[in-house]
Image: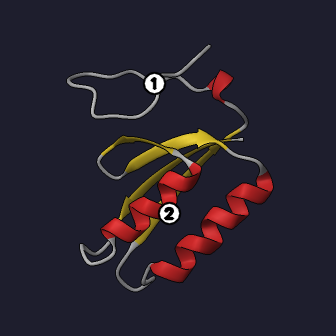
Amino acid sequence: MYVILVYDVNVARVGKVLKIARKYLNWVQNSVLEGELTEATFRALKADMERIIDPEEDSLLFYVLGNQKYAKRELIGIKKGGEEWIF
């Protein structure tokens, strides 16, 4: 499955959230990561994040797509980071 993670967390936890997310996904730009995951890896990512975030203050948004084949990305402006899509 192809997963896009968008996060909005308290500044005290931003570094920890990014560090964990980068173990699983590719950094694209501020607060956005994406990548191909298995179901088990996706569950592990969510479990790791649940141990760090405060659900009363923080927000994680996962977009789960069947695979990258059905996703289209368009960029306007400068590229912030991350891997290029390979087709």
- Where is residue 74 shown, x and y percent of the image? 39, 21
Q: Secondary structure at mark 1?
A: loop
41 left or right of 29? right
Q: Name which residue type carries label 2.
A: Ile
Q: Mark 1 Cα within 10 Å, few/some/many (few <14, many 20+)? A: few
Say how many tags the image has. 2
Looking at the picture, does residue 6 appear above or below residue 20?
above
- Where is residue 5 shown, x and y percent of the image? 49, 51
Which residue is located at x 69 percent, y 57 percent?
42
Q: Name which residue type carries label 1.
A: Arg
38 left or right of 76? right
- Residues 65 and 78: in front is 78
Looking at the picture, does residue 36 appear above or below residue 31?
above
Residue indicated by mark 2: 20
Looking at the picture, does residue 36 appear above or below residue 68?
below
Which residue is located at x 58 percent, y 26 percent?
71
Q: Secondary structure at mark 2?
A: helix
The residues bearing labels 2 and 1 have C-alpha atoms spaced at a distance of 24 Å
Residue indicated by mark 1: 73
Of the 4 image quadrants, the one containing the C terminus is: top right
21 left or right of 8? right
Quadrant in which residue 48 is drawn = bottom right
Of the 4 image quadrants, the one containing the N terminus is: top right
Which residue is located at x 76 percent, y 48 percent?
38
Quadrant in which residue 67 is drawn = top right
Residues at discs 2 and 1 in contact (Cβ within 8 Å): no
- Residues 48 and 61: in front is 48
Sequence-wise, the earlier of marks 2 and 1 is 2
- Residues 68 and 85: in front is 85
Q: Mark 2 Cα within 10 Å, few/some/many (few <14, many 20+)? A: some
- Where is residue 11 shown, x and y percent of the image? 24, 73
Looking at the picture, does residue 63 appear above or below residue 19?
above
